[in-house]
Image (spheres, helix red, strand yellow):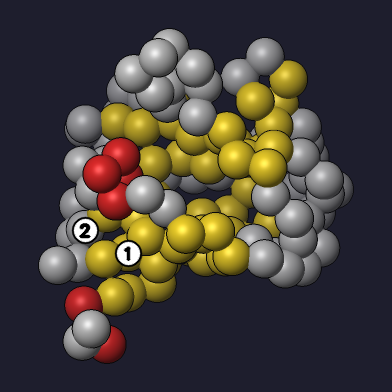
Amino acid sequence: MAAGRFINKTATIPAGQSLSGVLDCTSGGPAFLHMPPDWTSAMLSFQVSFDGVSFNDLFDRTAAELAINVLGGTSVNLDQTLWKPVLYLKVRSGVRGNPMPQAADRVITITIDTS
């Protein structure tokens, strides 16, 4: 694998909030999530958009919300068959029906595969 095909971007969930700002993934699909060590315990779920303006909660083809059980200071490998087409992304602490505000700003690093 060529090192130049991967870039890192960040999504920040502000203190007291549960949803990050917009992450532009038009250069490639998310391949890894790198969680901050001080993550306030919560599932991680997502919103996606085709235009960077209108966002929808991310569900899989079985109508189940896509949520990942994450721990602080860990990295998660993402299945490229699902993530490659993502153009714009927001990261949520908690799930659609139960968002979990973070105690402080949380910066999640996302590795993008530009190939």
Examine the image and state in which quarter residue 62 appears. top left
Given the current orientation, which residue lies at the most extreme left position? 115
**Which type of secondary structure does the marked residue at label 1 adopt?**
strand
Instruction: Please tell me whether residue 40 is drawn above or below residue 58 in the rendered image.
Output: below
The spot of residue 35 in percent (x, y) is 64, 62
Q: Report the amino acid beneath label 2.
A: Gly
Residue drawn at point x = 40 percent, y = 67 percent: 111
Whether residues under marks 2 and 1 lie with C-beta atoms below 8 angstroms apart, the answer is yes
Residue displayed at 39% across by 41% down: 89
- Please state, as top left, top right, bottom left or bottom right, where the C terminus lies in the image: bottom left
Residue furthest to the bottom: 3
Q: Which residue is mark 2?
A: 28
Q: Position of residue 9 (x, y in %)?
A: 41, 66
Depth check: give the residue in front, 103 or 92.
92
Q: Residues within 10 Å of mark 2 (few under 14, many from 20)?
A: many
Specify whether 19 is left or right of 65. right
Does residue 78 appear in the picture of this structure? yes
**Residue at the spot 54% in from the left edge and 59% down from the top edge:** 76
**Mark 1 sits on what residue?**
112
Query: In percent of the image, x 60 and y 40: which residue is there?
Result: 68
Q: Say whether residue 86 is left or right of residue 34.
A: left
Question: How far is disc 2 from disc 1 in space, using C-alphas?
Answer: 6 Å
- The numbered mark, 2 or 1, whose residue comes first in the sequence reads 2
Up-down relation of residue 56 to residue 45 (above or below): above
Does residue 17 appear in the picture of this structure? no
Which secondary structure lies at badge 2?
A: loop
**Is 74 situated above or below 68?**
below
Q: Amino acid at mark 1?
A: Ile
Residue 34 placement (x, y as % from top left)? 57, 65
* Spot occupied by residue 45 in the image (x, y as percentages of width and height): 56, 34
Asked which quadrant contains residue 56, the reply is top left
Identify which residue, 9 or 68, lies in the foreground: 68
